[in-house]
Image (cartoon, helix red, strand yellow):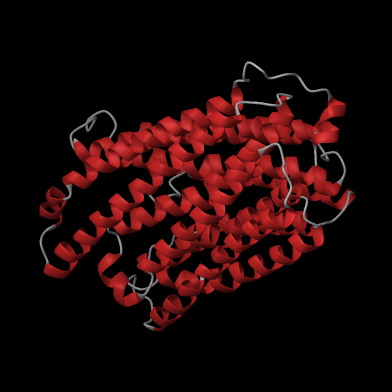
C-alpha cells in the first residue's frame, strides 16, 4: 500500500462483503420458496425476499466500486485521497441508507418499481452520497497524475450518478415509465458499469502482469468504445413489447447482438496480458478472479444475452427462466467477480496480511463459480421448456410451473453451493492463515507493484 488514505477503501470492502453474504443468503431463501411456495408467505412474502436479494446485490456492487475507486485512484493519481473524512462520512451515509431501505421493505415501505423500489428520501440520500463520492474522487484526480485508467473510471462513475437521476421520473404512462426505467437499469449494467469494470481490470492487469501501461491503455480504449457503441442503442432489446414503435425491434436486435463484442474483447485482453506479461505474481488468486471475470462475463452477458436478444426469439422467451439464467451469470461474471478480484488484490495489502489464505480463496472461486454455472444451465433448461409449453403451446402459467419443480430443486441446490463458496471467499479475505505475518509499510511499498 503506497498511500495511507487508501485505507478508506477497507470500509467499503468490508461493508460490501457483508452485504454480499446477505444477498446470496436471501437468494437461496428465494430459491427455497420456488420449491416450497408457502414458505414464510405470511412473514416475509416472496416479493420482499426478491426485493432484498436484488437490492443488496446492487448496493454491495456499488459499494465495492467505490472502494475500488478509492484504492486505485490514489495509485493512479500518485497522491493521497483529497479528503479521507468525506470518504468515511459517505460510507456511513450509504450504509445507513441501504439498511433503512431493507428495513422499509420488510415493513412494506417501497416504491414498487423493480430495482428502484427505494422511497424518495432514500433516492435523495443516494444522490447526496454520489455527489460526495464524485467530488472527492474528481478533486483527487485533478491534483495528481491523469491516466487512461483513472479517466475512464471517472467517466463511468459520473455516468452511474447522472443516469440514476431518471429514477426520480415516474410517468403515469406505462410505456414512458418502462422506457425511462431502462435508462437506469440497462444503461447502468450494459453501459457505464462496463466502463468501471474495464478500468478496474486494466488497473489489475498493470499490477499483476507487469505489461507496459501503454499496451493496456490501448486495449482499454478499444473495450470502452465497443461497450458504448453497442450498449447505448442495445437498450432497444428491452423496447420490443412495451408499446414502442416497431423499428426498435431492428435496432435492438442488431446492436444488442453486437454487445457480445466488448465482452469477447475483454477475454482476449486479460488472457493476452497474462501471456505477454509472463510475470509470476505472488497473488495468483487475484489473477484467477480477473481471468474468470472476463470468461464468465463473456458467457453470461455475451453468449447468454445473445441467446434471447433477437426479437423473434425474445417474443417467446422474455420474462421466462431464460432471463433469470442470463441475469445470474451476467451479474456474477461481470460485476461480482471484478469486485472480488480487486478485493483479493487490495485487502491483503490494506490489512497487512501477506501471505493470506490464498488457496481457500481460490477454492471459493471454483465452488462459487461451479454453483453459478450449474444454476445457469438449470434455469436455461427450465426456461426453454417454459417458453415452448407456455408461450408456444399455450398452457397456463401455473400448470407450467408445476412441470418445472425438478429444475427448481436443482436451482436451490446450486444456490446453496454458491452460499458456501461466498462464505469461503469472505473468510479467506478476513481471517489470516497460520503462517500469515504482519507486513511493514516499507514492505508494502516494495510489493505494491
Residue 229 picture location, percent across and down: 59, 73
Q: Quadrant of residue 70?
A: top right
Q: Which quadrant holds the C terminus?
A: top right
Q: Residue at x 28, y 72 (%)?
A: 315
Residue 220 picture location, percent across and down: 70, 63
In depth, the one of 81 and 444 nearer the eye is 444
Q: Is residue 105 visible?
A: no
Q: Residue at x 18, y 34 (%)?
A: 38
Q: Is residue 35 above or below residue 146?
A: above
Q: Is residue 84 above or below residue 252?
A: above
In depth, the one of 93 and 238 nearer the eye is 238
Q: Quadrant of residue 109?
A: top left
Q: Is residue 246 left or right of residue 447?
A: left
The tally of labels here is: 0
Q: Residue at x 49, y 34 (%)?
A: 364
Q: Quadrant of residue 312?
A: bottom left
Q: Residue furthest top?
A: 434
Residue 117 picture location, percent across and down: 43, 46
Q: Is residue 16 above or below residue 372?
A: above
Q: Is residue 143 visible?
A: yes
Q: Is residue 413 left or right of residue 3?
A: left
Q: Which quadrant holds the N terminus?
A: top right
Q: Is residue 285 left or right of residue 212?
A: left
In depth, the one of 101 and 437 nearer the eye is 437
Q: Is residue 41 left or right of residue 426?
A: left
Q: Residue at x 34, y 70 (%)?
A: 242
Amino acid at each position: 500500500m503506497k498511500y495511507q488514505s487508501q485505507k478508506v477503501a477497507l470500509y467499503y470492502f468490508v461493508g460490501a462483503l457483508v452485504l454480499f453474504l446477505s444477498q446470496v443468503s436471501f437468494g437461496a431463501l428465494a430459491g427455497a420458496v420456488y420449491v416450497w411456495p408457502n414458505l414464510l408467505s405470511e412473514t416475509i412474502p416472496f416479493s420482499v425476499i426478491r426485493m432484498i436479494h436484488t437490492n443488496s446485490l446492487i448496493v454491495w456492487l456499488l459499494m465495492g466500486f467505490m472502494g475500488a475507486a478509492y484504492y486505485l485512484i490514489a495509485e493512479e493519481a500518485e497522491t493521497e485521497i483529497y479528503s479521507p473524512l468525506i470518504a468515511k462520512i459517505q460510507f456511513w451515509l450509504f450504509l445507513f441508507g441501504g439498511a433503512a431501505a431493507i428495513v422499509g421493505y420488510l415493513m412494506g415501505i417501497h416504491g414498487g418499481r423493480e430495482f428502484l423500489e427505494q422511497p424518495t428520501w432514500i433516492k435523495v440520500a443516494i444522490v447526496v452520497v454520489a455527489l460526495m463520492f464524485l467530488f472527492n474522487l474528481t478533486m483527487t484526480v485533478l491534483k495528481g497524475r491523469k491516466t487512461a485508467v483513472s479517466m475512464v473510471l471517472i467517466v463511468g462513475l459520473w455516468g452511474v450518478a447522472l443516469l440514476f437521476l431518471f429514477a426520480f421520473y415516474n410517468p403515469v404512462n406505462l410505456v414512458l415509465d418502462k422506457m425511462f426505467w431502462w435508462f437506469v437499469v440497462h444503461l447502468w449494467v450494459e453501459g457505464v458499469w462496463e466502463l468501471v469494470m474495464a478500468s478496474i481490470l486494466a488497473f489489475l492487469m498493470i499490477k499483476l502482469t507487469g505489461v507496459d501501461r501503454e499496451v493496456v491503455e490501448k486495449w482499454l480504449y478499444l473495450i470502452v468504445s465497443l461497450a458504448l457503441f453497442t450498449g447505448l442503442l442495445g437498450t432497444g432489446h428491452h423496447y420490443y413489447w412495451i408499446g414502442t414503435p416497431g423499428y426498435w425491434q431492428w435496432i435492438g436486435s442488431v446492436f444488442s447482438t453486437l454487445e457480445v463484442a466488448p465482452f469477447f474483447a475483454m477475454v482476449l485482453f486479460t488472457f493476452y496480458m497474462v501471456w505477454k506479461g509472463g510475470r509470476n505474481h505472488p497473488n495468483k488468486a487475484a489473477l484467477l478472479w480477473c481471468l474468470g471475470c472476463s470468461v464468465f462475463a463473456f458467457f453470461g452477458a455475451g453468449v447468454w444475452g445473445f441467446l434471447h436478444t433477437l426479437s423473434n426469439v425474445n417474443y417467446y422467451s422474455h420474462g421466462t427462466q431464460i432471463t433469470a439464467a442470463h441475469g445470474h451469470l451476467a451479474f456474477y461474471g461481470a460485476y461480482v467477480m471484478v469486485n472480488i478480484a480487486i478485493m483479493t488484490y487490495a485487502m491483503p495489502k490494506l490489512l497487512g496480511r501477506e501471505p493470506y489464505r490464498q488457496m481457500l480463496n481460490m477454492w471459493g472461486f471454483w465452488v462459487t463459480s461451479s454453483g453459478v454455472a450449474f444454476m445457469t444451465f438449470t434455469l436455461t433448461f427450465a426456461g426453454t421448456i417454459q417458453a415452448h409449453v407456455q408461450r408456444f403451446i399455450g398452457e397456463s402459467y401455473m400448470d407450467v410451473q408445476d412441470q418445472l419443480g425438478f429444475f427448481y430443486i436443482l436451482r436451490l441446490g446450486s444456490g446453496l453451493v454458491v452460499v458456501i463458496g461466498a462464505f469461503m471467499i469472505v473468510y479467506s479475505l478476513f481471517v489470516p492463515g497460520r503462517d500469515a505475518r504482519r507486513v511493514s509499510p516499507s514492505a508494502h511499498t516494495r510489493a505494491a507493484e
